[in-house]
Amino acid sequence: MDKIVVEGGVKLKGEIEISGAKNAALPILVSSLLADGESVYSNVPRLMDIESIKLLLSSLGARIETDDRTVRIDGSGLHNHEAPYDLVRKMRASILVLGPLMARLKKARVSLPGGCAIGARPINFHLKGLQRFGAAISLKHGYVEASTDGLKGAEIFFDIVTVTGTENMMMAAVLADGITTLRNAAQEPEVVALAEVLQKMGAKIEGAGTPVITVSGVESLNPTSVSIIPDRIETGTYMIAAALTNGEITLKNCRPNHLEAVINKLEETGTRIETKEDQIRVTGPSVIKSADLKTLPYPGFPTDLQAQFMVLMSVADGKSVISETIFENRFIHVSELERMGADITISGHSALIKGVPNLSGAPVMATDLRASASLILAGLVAQGTTEVNRVYHIDRGYEAIEQKFKSLGARINRITV
Ligand code: EPU
C-alpha cells in the first residue's frame, strides 16, 4: 500500500490549478441515467471515487468512455436495478443511484451503505423521501428494496440538511408526475451544480441554492454536456496549507464565491487573501492567530475542512475551540495529531486546541479522506519526517496531491510499498 512521506519546514510558494469537484461530479455523472443518449462531462477529476461511480453506472447498463478528464456516459442501456454491496460499501455516494433508478426503472435494489469512519451516516431521509413519492420500501438482507407504479410529486421536509439526500430527491422528482417541494434543502454549490445540469437536460427546477427547491416533473430528459465546477474543498485545503507554512500561493481555476466562510475564517487567523473571479492568492501569517470554529451546512464553514483547520489551530498562538455539528465522529485525526505533538482535548462534539510552537514528524494514518489530508498538512509544518499511511483515502478525493504540493516547493514523495 502506498504511503506519502513529507519533510516539513518549507514555505509553500507558487501556483496550482484546482481540479473539478468530486462531490459535484458524483451526482452529475449519476444524473446521466435520467436520459437516453450520450452526455459529455468535462473537467472531471481523476479520482478513485470517480472510478467507483463509473463502475457502478456501467454495472447498471450505462456505456462509459473516458478520455483524460472528459467522461461520456450513455444512459440508454440502463436495465439493471441493483447496486451491489461490493460497489456501495466502497463509496457511500453510491446511494445516489436510488432516485434515478426509481425514476427510470420504477424499482431499485441498493445495498445499505452501513457505517463509516466519520459516523453512522444513516440514509433514512433518502428512504422517507422516496416513500413520500409513493414508493414502497423494504429493507431485506442488507438491501433497500424499492418499487413504485410511478413516482408522484411530493412535499418533502428534511429534518436535517442532507446534501446527497437533497440531490437524490431532486433526481427522483424531475421525472415524477406533478410538483415536488423540498424544504430545508441543502444549499451547497454541488446541489446547485446538479440542479443546473438537470435544467440543461430539460428539468423544471426552481430555488436550488435556497432552502426550498420546487421541481415540476417532466415526461423525459435529454442528454447534455457540462463542465464540472472547481472543488471548493480542494481549494480550501491548499489555502490552509499556505496559511500554515507562511507561504504565498495562487490557486487558479477556483470559485472564491463558494468559499466565503473559509476566507472569512482564515482572515481571522491573520492570513491575507486576495480574490479575482476565478483565482485566490493566499499569504500565510508569520504568527497564526487562534480562531474558534463551528462546522455548519453551506454557507457555513464546511465539515470537509474541519480537520485541516484543526492542524492550523494546533500551531496557532493561543487556544481555540472547534465544534463539529455535522458528523458525530469526525475527530479521528485528533489522536494522530497528538502523536505529532498537538495539544487537543475532545469534549463531546468540541475540541479544545492549545497551540504549540512546533509539531514533530511521525508515522501516522487515518481512516477518512479529509483526515488523511490534514495529516499531510501537519507533515508540511512539522519538524522532521512524517509518513502518512493508507494513502488510498487521499486518492479517493484529491487529484495528484503530491505533485501539486511538490510544484509549490514541498518535500513530499509517494512511496509504493
Ligand atoms: N443524515 C441522516 N440521515 C440521512 C442523511 C443524512 O441522519 O438520511 C445525517 C448524516 O449522518 C450527517 C448529516 O445528516 O450527520 C449530514 O449528512 P449529509 O447527508 O449532508 O452528508 P452526505 O450527503 O452523505 C456529503 C458529502 C460529504 C460531506 C457532507 C456534508 C458527497 C458525496 N459527500 O455527504 O463529503 O462531508 O455532504 O457536507 O457529497 C467528503 O468529501 O470527504 C465527504 C465526506
Image (cartoon, helix red, strand yellow):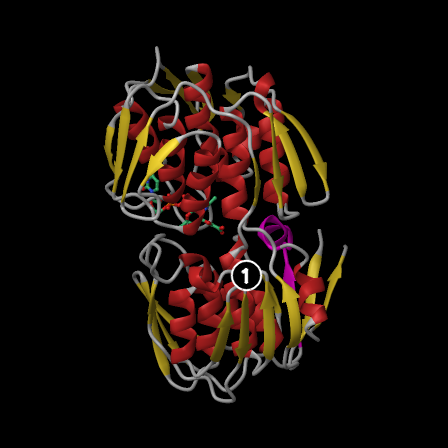
Q: Viewed as shown, does residue 379 lie left or right of 176?
A: right
Mark 1 Cα-neighbour bin, 10 Å: few <14, some 14–19, many ≥20: many
Residue placed farthest to the right in the image? 416
Magenta stretch bounds: 385-398
Q: Position of residue 373 (x, y in %)?
A: 56, 61
Q: Viewed as shown, does residue 7 lie left or right of 75?
A: right
Queried whether the magenta region covers residue 193, the answer comes back as no
Q: Viewed as shown, does residue 199 lie left or right of 413?
A: left
Amino acid on which the number 1 mark rests in the picture: Cys
Which quadrant of the figure contains the C terminus? bottom right
Residue 54 or residue 20, whichever sits in front: 20
Q: Picture quarter containing residue 296?
A: bottom left
Q: Position of residue 381 (x, y in %)?
A: 59, 78
**In terms of secondary structure, where does tag 1 sit?**
loop
Residue occupying the point 73% across, 61% down: 414
Q: Is residue 315 above or below residue 362?
A: below
Residue placed farthest to the top in the image? 149
Residue occupying the point 48% across, 88% down: 287
Residue occupying the point 27% across, 46% down: 211
Q: Position of residue 338 (x, y in %)?
A: 49, 72
Q: Position of residue 229 (x, y in %)?
A: 53, 50
Q: Is residue 403 above or below residue 281?
A: above
Q: Picture quarter containing residue 138?
A: top left
The answer to whether any part of residue 319 appears in the image is: yes
Q: Which residue position holds label 1?
A: 254
Q: Is residue 61 above or below residue 276?
A: above
The number of numbered discs placed on residues in the rendered structure image is: 1
Residue 41 or residue 6, whichever sits in front: 41
The answer to whether any part of residue 113 appears in the image is: no
